[in-house]
């Protein structure tokens, strides 16, 4: 609980207020044009992986082709790879997901991915699910950087739940 001038706010209420203010501000921004089909669409992210037995930090690069299905809704893929350090060795993690994207406002979108992640020679393939949110720039700060992305994934391993937090940049050409 956070107390401000003797008014109590839960963390959820505070986060909801921040999101609503952000969406309201974004509603006044210029519409960002998104092509009907994006083939050269990628994410470069920092990846933090947490289990009850430890954690690992790495980068992940994903290829994210997508196509607009309806107004404000698109569908696509997320295919990626990262290198993780386990308790005994370093290994590749390969991920592949189907992704649904909804355009919340002219500059904000939310994704939900459903797929799998394979820990090569270190645990096999397991179900992966998670949301992410993106802020799309009106004017790209660098020619190919078009958005900031933050997300969470749950990797459902039978012996332990694995939490993955991602923060990074989206790039398209």
Image: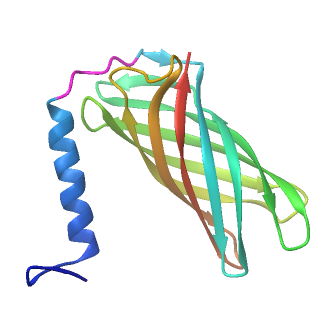
- Prevailing secondary structure of the magenta residues: loop
On-image quarter of the C terminus: top right
Residue at 42%, 15% in the rendered image: 36
Q: In this rendered view, identify the residue nearer to me: 130 or 151.
A: 151
Up-down: is 46 above or below 141?
below
Would residue 90 appear left or right of 128 to someone viewing this image? right
On-image quarter of the N terminus: bottom left
Which image quadrant for residue 26? top left
Q: Residue 99: say if magenta.
A: no
Residue at 55%, 56% in the rendered image: 129
In the image as oriented, which residue stretches furthest toward the front? 5
Q: Residue 31: say if magenta.
A: yes
Residue 71 placement (x, y as % from top left) = 28, 24
Up-down: is 156 above or below 36?
below
Would residue 25 appear left or right of 172 to someone viewing this image? left
Would residue 7 appear left or right of 30 to someone viewing this image? left
Residue at 24%, 53% in the rendered image: 19
- Magenta region: 29-34
Residue 109 placement (x, y as % from top left) = 35, 38
Up-down: is 145 above or below 108?
above
Residue 60 placement (x, y as % from top left) = 68, 45
């Amino acid at each position: 609980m956070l107390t401000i001038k003797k008014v109590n706010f839960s963390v959820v209420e505070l986060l909801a207020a921040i999101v609503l203010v952000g969406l309201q501000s974004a509603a006044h921004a210029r519409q960002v044009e998104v092509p009907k089909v994006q083939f050269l669409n990628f994410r470069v992210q920092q990846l933090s992986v947490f289990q009850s037995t430890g954690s690992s930090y790495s980068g992940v690069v994903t290829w994210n082709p997508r196509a607009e299905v309806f107004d404000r809704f698109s569908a696509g893929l997320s295919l990626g790879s990262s290198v993780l350090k386990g308790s005994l060795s370093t290994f590749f993690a390969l991920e592949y997901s189907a992704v649904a994207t909804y355009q919340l406002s002219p500059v904000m979108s939310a994704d939900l991915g459903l797929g799998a992640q394979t820990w090569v020679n270190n645990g096999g393939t397991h179900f992966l699910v998670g949301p992410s949110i993106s802020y799309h720039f009106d004017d790209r700060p660098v020619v190919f950087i078009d958005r900031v992305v933050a997300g969470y994934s749950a990797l459902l391993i039978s012996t332990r739940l694995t939490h993955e937090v991602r923060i990074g940049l989206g790039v398209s050409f």
